[in-house]
Structures are given as C-alpha cells and as structure tokens.
C-alpha cells in the first residue's frame, strides 16, 4: 500500500480542499512569542502565528530551521483547522503524559508539580546537546539520575525517554540497557534515521532488553511510517498534527503504517495543542498516553483556560480550536519585525501548496 492511495490530498492539490489566498490566511493573523518556564528544544520562547478562518482559529508554527517545503505541511494543518474543521471524535477525553525537560534530578519534582495530580505517564528528555552540537558534558550520569528520580517519585507511572536522535547506536544500546531496571514504556527516537533505529531495536533484543522503540523524527514525511514498519525499526510511531499536514492526513498515515501511535505536541500553543487532542480523540485505537501536556511548560499562553491536562487527561476539543483570549494574545504579541518574518514564511509555504495545482 502506498501513501498516495490512502492520504487525503493537501489543500490546493487536485481534488483537495480549497486553498485560501495568502491574503485570506493573513487577514486576522497575529504572531505571538510565548515565554517558557524551562529551556526546551534549546529555547526559552516559542513563537507561532495564529490564524483565523471561517471554521475557527488555527496555528502555523514550523520551527525556525524548517524550509518552505516542510513548512507547507504545517500550513496545510492550519488550513484544515481554520477553513475546514476537524473530524468527529470517538472519545470524550485523551490521556496525556507529563514532560520533564533536561533538568537536574533535583528539579524534577518541581516540574512534575506543574501537572497536578493524576500523572499516569511521564516523558523524560535525555541526550541534551550543547551549542556546539555534542552531548552536554556529564549528560550520561545526568540522564540516568533524572529518569531514576522520575521513577522514584512516580513508582507506578509509565516512564518513557525521548533522546531526539541524540545518541549514537552504541550510546543508545548502553543507556537503554542501563535503564532496563526502570521499566521504560518505550524510548523515543534514540538515534537518527530508520536504519539506525532498526539496529538499536535489534541489538537491544539480542541483549534481552525488551524496551519498545518509538519513531518520532523518522516520521516526518507521509511515506516514513510505512518505511519504519517495513524495516521493523520501531514498535510504535509518534505523530504530530502540524508536521504531517493535519488531523485527517495524520490519521490516514497511522492507518497505513499499521503501528500503534502516540499523538504528540510540536511545542504548540493551546490552539495547536487542541489539534493534537482532536487527532487523539479521532483515532480508533489509542493505547498510549499522548505527549500533549507541553502547555504546562509555558509561563503564558493564549487561551484561558490554557489547554493543559487535568488529572492526566485532556478533553476532546470538538471540531474547532478554543478561542484565544484577546488580552492574553496582546500580552504575548510579537513585534512587527517578527510578525513580518512569519508572514513571509506563510507566503513561502503557500507557494509550495499552490504549485500542486
């Protein structure tokens, strides 16, 4: 089965949804810059462009290093949210994990407290890299201490680690073997690429370590989940609405891959997080808690209440995103130069979608 036979077409493609003009997309656009409580993905602020269409609010927030081609999928997701609306849910709420960034073990408890009671699953960031690109000195022992502190505080929770491709295959096998006593639920993208994932998974099994492997960064194009499944590189895939082009396309990709999925955040604002919850609420099968609790990492957000979990769950959002609070939006509104930069990114991504026709 090829991805082309199962995926809904992108906006602007033959038979696809209507592609709004750039002017329609930018008519109510506002760039925001959200301060974070801790450093995450190397930043202390998260920028996004909020859009408003006839179906509701939407978010366009590809990371700064992404070019027009990759960003076009993020724009497709925004068009679905704001101009089409999301598909109906099959569940009223979705389970959500807490996220612990690469903090010192002594700070883990304070991070977890932000999520309140009822934490059933925790994702722990590991393999932090410094500005020069290499692993932060002492990261090996710091990672072990951080993960073990989470297990100590939450002995019954499902604990998973996310290395964001930060290890070599040798480092990944060593670390995951050392953490076997923690009873990890899975390890998310410990190494780059599909081939190295398959190697790590195979070598762990040869050493008697049954920790599941999850593909995240290796699942960014429509054909990637199919390649992951064919290579036996992972036990499950991590899917994110914006990079995959919207809720409908992400759901079709999960179905085509035939692997269990974890719905995760792209460090979205509450508007984007609602899209992740819409996907999780729509999937027929949802065996793992979702990585949609990252709203707790923002010091300020754009919705009141913010789209953060209560007792370990998020409600299904319905077919549209929550309405941003004008006062909260004003408090995090980006400057004119930043807004103009985001407008240019919309134009570049829009040109990619328009070229399909």
Image: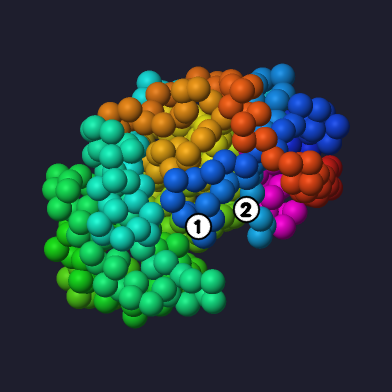
Q: Which residue is mark 1?
A: 41
* Residue at 69 percent of width and 40 percent of height: 334
Q: Position of residue 307 (x, y in %)?
A: 46, 29
Mark 2 neighbour density, 10 Å: few (under 14) some (14–19) many (20 or more): some
Q: In this rendering, is residue 263 above or below 102?
A: above
Q: Tag on residue 110?
A: none
Residue 320 seen from this side? no
Q: Which residue is mark 2?
A: 63
Q: In this rendering, is residue 10 above or below 148?
A: above
Look at discs 2 and 1 and give the one toward the viewer: 1
Magenta-drawn stretch contains 69: yes
User: Disc 1 on helix, strand or loop?
Assistant: loop
Q: In this rendering, is residue 158 above or below 177?
A: above
Q: In the rendered view, does 112 fall on the left or right side of 30?
A: left
Q: In the rendered view, does 341 fall on the left or right side of 40?
A: right
In whole angstroms, how far apart are the C-alphas of marks 2 and 1? Answer: 10 Å
* Residue at 41 percent of width and 73 percent of height: 136
* Residue at 67 percent of width and 35 percent of height: 333
Q: Position of residue 85 (x, y in %)?
A: 62, 24
Residue 310 seen from this side? yes
Q: Earlier in the sequence, mark 2 or mark 1?
A: 1
Q: In this rendering, is residue 17 above or below 67?
A: above
Looking at the rendering, the stretch of residues picked out in magenta corresponds to 67-78
């Amino acid at each position: 089965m090829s991805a082309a036979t199962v995926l809904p077409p992108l906006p602007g493609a033959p038979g696809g949804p209507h592609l709004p003009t750039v002017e329609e997309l930018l008519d109510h656009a506002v760039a925001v810059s959200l301060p974070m409580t801790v450093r995450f993905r190397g930043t202390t602020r998260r920028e996004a462009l909020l859009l408003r269409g006839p179906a509701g609010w939407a978010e366009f927030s590809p990371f700064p290093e992404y070019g027009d081609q990759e960003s076009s999928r993020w724009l497709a997701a925004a068009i679905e949210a704001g101009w089409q609306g999301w598909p109906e849910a099959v569940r009223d709420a979705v389970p959500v994990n807490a996220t612990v960034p690469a903090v010192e073990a002594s700070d883990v408890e304070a991070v977890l407290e932000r999520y309140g009671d009822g934490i059933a699953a925790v994702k722990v960031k590991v393999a932090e890299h410094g500005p020069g690109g290499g692993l932060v000195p002492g990261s090996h022992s710091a990672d072990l201490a951080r993960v073990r502190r989470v297990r100590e505080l939450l002995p019954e929770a499902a604990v998973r680690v996310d290395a964001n491709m930060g290890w070599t295959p040798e480092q990944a096998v060593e670390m995951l073997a050392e953490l076997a006593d923690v009873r990890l639920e899975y390890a998310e993208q410990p190494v780059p690429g599909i081939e190295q994932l398959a190697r790590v998974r195979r070598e762990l099994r040869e050493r008697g370590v049954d920790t599941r492997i999850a593909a995240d960064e290796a699942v960014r194009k429509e054909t990637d989940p199919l390649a992951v499944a064919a290579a036996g590189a992972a036990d499950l895939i991590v899917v994110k609405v914006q990079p995959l082009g919207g809720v409908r396309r992400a759901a079709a990709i999960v179905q085509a891959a035939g692997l269990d999925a974890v719905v995760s955040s792209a460090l979205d604002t509450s508007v984007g997080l609602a899209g992740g919850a819409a996907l999780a609420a729509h999937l027929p099968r949802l065996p793992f808690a979702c990585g949609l609790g990252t709203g707790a990492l923002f010091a300020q957000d754009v919705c009141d209440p913010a789209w953060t979990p209560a007792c370990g769950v998020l409600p299904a959002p319905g077919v549209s995103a929550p309405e941003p609070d004008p006062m909260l939006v004003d408090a995090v509104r980006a400057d004119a130069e930043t807004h103009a930069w985001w407008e240019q990114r919309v134009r570049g991504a829009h040109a990619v979608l328009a070229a399909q026709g």
